[in-house]
Image (spheres, helix red, strand yellow):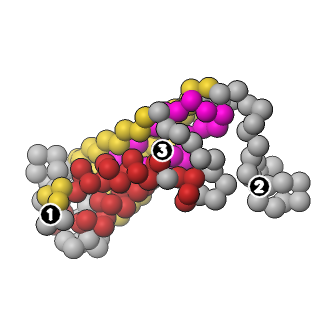
């Protein structure tokens, strides 16, 4: 049974009131594929545009997105984040950018959605700032790589 459905199969927030507060972490990634004309603009680990430095802006957007996750996903619990780190790792040879988001909190529920939202919002910001050069940007493979805390840990890597 899905955890976000009640006995009558209606959407319901999961009651976490009886769960212990534990340290929770999550690490998610989104891959952004760049068309050749954008890949050619990559210099010193950044793409500079008239709108400003794309990666630095995307990092800030990713942190903001992670912090606002419960406002975007209806049944997601609001969490105070202890830490949120967004790292952008360009691979010019492959024409790809890996956007990693790592989140930590002490709470009764996990931060997987915050990590995935942070990575996705950062990737969308890259698209938004670079679309003037090409609309051929692809955001793919958004996924959870790792989570710790709570009932069980998960490690995809």
Say which label, 2 or 1, has the lower sequence index: 2
For the residues labelled 1 and 3, the Cα–Cα distance comes to 27 Å
Element assignment for label 1? strand
Give me the residue at 57% from left, 30% from top. 106
Whether residue 119 is visible? no
Counting from the top left corner in percent of width and height, residue 120 is at 43, 55
How far apart are the two marked residues, 2 and 1, measured between alpha carbons? 44 Å
Which residue in the protein does label 3 denote?
A: 115
State yes or no: discs 3 and 2 in contact (Cβ < 8 Å). Answer: no
Residues rendered magenta in the picture = 98-118
Q: Is residue 28 above or below residue 136?
A: above
Viewed as shown, does residue 79 lie left or right of 102? right
* Residue depicted at x 13% and y 66%: 50
Q: Earlier in the sequence, mark 1 or mark 3?
A: 1
Is 53 drawn above or below residue 111 in the view shown?
below
Q: Residues within 10 Å of mark 2 (few under 14, many from 20)?
A: few
Q: CA distance from mark 3 to mark 2?
A: 22 Å
Kindly identify which numbered label has been placed on residue 12: 2
Q: Which residue is mark 1?
A: 49
């Amino acid at each position: 049974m899905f955890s976000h459905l009640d006995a009558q199969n209606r959407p319901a927030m999961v009651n976490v009131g009886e769960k212990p507060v534990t340290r929770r972490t999550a690490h998610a990634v989104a891959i952004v594929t760049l068309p050749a004309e954008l890949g050619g603009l990559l210099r010193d680990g950044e793409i500079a545009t008239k709108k400003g430095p794309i990666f630095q802006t995307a990092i800030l957007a990713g942190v903001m997105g992670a912090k606002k996750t419960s406002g975007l996903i209806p049944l997601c619990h609001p969490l105070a984040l202890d830490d949120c780190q967004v790292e952008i790792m360009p691979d010019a040879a492959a024409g790809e950018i890996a956007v990693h988001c790592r989140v930590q909190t002490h709470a009764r529920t996990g931060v997987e959605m915050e990590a995935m939202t942070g990575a996705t919002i950062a990737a969308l910001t890259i698209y938004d700032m670079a679309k003037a050069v090409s609309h051929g940007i692809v955001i793919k493979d958004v996924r959870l790589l790792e989570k710790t805390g709570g009932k069980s840990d998960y490690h995809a890597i």
